Amino acid sequence: MTEPARNRLAEATSPYLLQHADNPVHWWPWGPEALAEAEATGKPILLSVGYAACHWCHVMAHESFEDDEVAEVMNRLFVNIKVDREERPDIDQIYMSALHTFNERGGWPMTMFLDPRGRPFWGGTYFPKEAKWGRPGFVQILEEMARLWREEPDKIAKNADVVHRRLAARAATTTRSPLGPDYLDAVAERLLGVMDPVEGGTRGAPKFPQTPLLEFFWRAARHRAGRPAADVVLLTLSRMSRGGIWDHVGGGFARYAVDDHWLVPHFEKMLYDNAQLLDLLGRAWSDTGDPLFRARIEETVAWLAREMTLPGGAFAASIDADSEHEEGRFYVWSEAEIRDVLGSDADEFAAAYDVTRDGNWEGKIILNRSSDRTRWGRDREARLAHSRARLLERRAERVRPATDDKILADWNGAMIHALVLAGRRLDRPDWIERAVAAYRFVATEMGYDGDRLGHAWRDGRSVKPGLSSDLVHMARAALALAETLGRNPWLDDARRWMTALETHHADPAGGWFLTADDAEALIVRPASTSDDAVPNPIAIGLDNCIRLAVLTGDDQWRARAEEILGRLSSAMLADIFSTASLSTALDLAIGAVEVVLIVPPDTDGTPLRRVVFESTDPRIILFETESTAALPETHPAAHKPAVDGLPTAWVCREGSCGLPLTEPGPLRTLLETGRYV
């Protein structure tokens, strides 16, 4: 007897799926049972992909998925599957690629129509319940897709076949030598042309942080692109830090701004954005000494501690854009409320934060300092900080947006890495301790079989096997801890996870598949060289390979990185924008700077170590040891001494080392100017 139709999301761990557990739609979670149901009933599949903090996902849910009449049509005509893109980025990547083959702009919610084998034949993103904005109504679309399925099966099959072939096609790879510095210079010159010279970021609206691109520009500044490349990063970070995309009361960056000058955020806050921006802000602070950047670093970490840290120490995935069914309601203000809270301090605050009677967004106020030209002064900033603290207390009385409290190994790895670098740059050992706590939670609670990681964890349940992104981000976090706290046990972890990456994810065409060899079989095995809002995991893996080669002395890792870069050079040449993180990895492969710091017993290497930690050059790899006898015989610093028994730094590049340095000043000058051997 067939099991009666029902909504099957109540047992899910994903907060996004649980948001839909009471829908009248008979949702299935993704899995072989749902595909089997489609096969048995002969119905096509409606696949809906979104995430918990997504505003337009909520809009479509309220309009359609909570509506009994719409649900009746969905249940009658389709097998309906709901997917959390953060919990299953492998599924999201496949069907987002399919959506692009239909010449549709990507985004969430993503709405795809599949045959019972999971092959897509049409799709889109948000559809309104009723026809508007030139888009058909959702019920119209459902009925038309069902009609095509019944009456024109040959057309459906042909479309599904074409899309599947495109998804399965791999770009032809040519075994060639990796690209070199000339390529990086040419890419930087081309990409600088897409940047906004006034507001930073890419030109036009909406404005996303585009952190993989900013990271590339920071590297390019040490090549022919020079200071203009660094300046576009500093401009972007400054405008973002002053704009409404930054939460001036509670800290943390929103996902993007809908306008072209960073004022109006799409209010959701994602862990991964703040991780990447925290890293860049640290370099901006060291480069300029601008107190704005230091303030944003400290406020980001305070927000992380107050709102994102879960029991056990790991970090939540995101905070919703909506509260009380309204986007941004938690974050916006009226002039009257601000004056009620601040009293006599309101005038100074209003002048700094664009507070006016009429507001700056739909009659409300999004706090920002984009037009505040008053010079940064310690006393004034202290008063403004006191006012912000009072507003934070008042805001705490409001209904909070929901927090997606699932733990993602890759996003946690990214934040751990950024937090370690920020902690050592600003000499905050408590931040490093926070990073270690998060690291140990992920490694312990989400690790299994000795060298594997799950991808998502909530309420004691883990989604596994994990993805290549989990392994590479946690390995990079381990490498940062190894440089900061001593090589073991962190280095052992990094090597273990990178070995698991090679064992379970290696792609003969170059790089690594997103999914493991023992994961559920999908219509294709996803492997992309493109960046998204986060760097491509292949690029992070390549960075890890170079660092592992230096820290372990095993040059097989370097050889592997060079092999992959050679195989992916065609993809890099074909799309320089979306492969910016691969160009960043290439920069490290051809320009790694090894600082071998010898700290003899009973001496203090802190002054030299701090110089390395404060450097703005991300190509630096620190190898600290009591004696260079620990280095492999082939290393250019092997057997070089500590001068006069003092802590000594040897800076090595391209197979040779410069003069030994025992004082912080000369070492700082060398690392800042980049005039290496």
Image: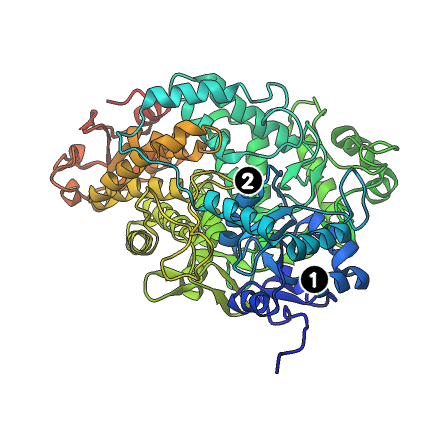
> Which one is nearer the viewer's eye here, 95 or 572?
95
Q: Secondary structure at mark 1?
A: helix
Of badges 1 and 2, nearer the viewer stands: 1
Q: Quadrant of the N terminus?
A: bottom right
Quick check: 177 left or right of 584?
left
Identify the residue at horizontal 46%, vertical 51% (top origin). 410
> Which one is nearer the viewer's eye here, 78 or 489?
78
**Mark 1–mark 2 CB contact (< 8 Å):** no
Quick check: 225 left or right of 626?
right
How far apart, in angstroms, are the residues tagged by discs 1 and 2?
25 Å
> Which one is nearer the viewer's eye here, 20 or 300?
20
Q: Secondary structure at mark 2?
A: helix
Residue kind at label 1, given as amino acid type: Leu
Say few, some or many: other residues with alpha carbon within 10 Å of mark 1 (under 14 / 14 to 19 / 20 or more). Answer: many
Outermost residue, bottom direction? 1
Identify the residue at horizontal 67%, vertical 77% (top origin). 4
| Rendering quarter of residue 489 | bottom left
Q: Which residue is mark 1?
A: 77
Coordinates of residue 359 in the picture (x, y in percent): 84, 34
Q: Which mark is residue 101?
A: 2
Q: Is residue 615 visible?
A: no
Q: Is residue 480 above or below residue 264?
A: below
Say few, some or many: other residues with alpha carbon within 10 Å of mark 2 (under 14 / 14 to 19 / 20 or more). Answer: some
Q: Earlier in the sequence, mark 1 or mark 2?
A: 1
Q: Quadrant of the C terminus?
A: top left
Q: Is residue 648 visible?
A: yes
Coordinates of residue 361 in the picture (x, y in percent): 80, 35
Residue kind at label 2, given as amino acid type: Thr
Coordinates of residue 539 in the picture (x, y in percent): 39, 39
* Image mark count: 2
Q: Which mark is residue 578?
A: none
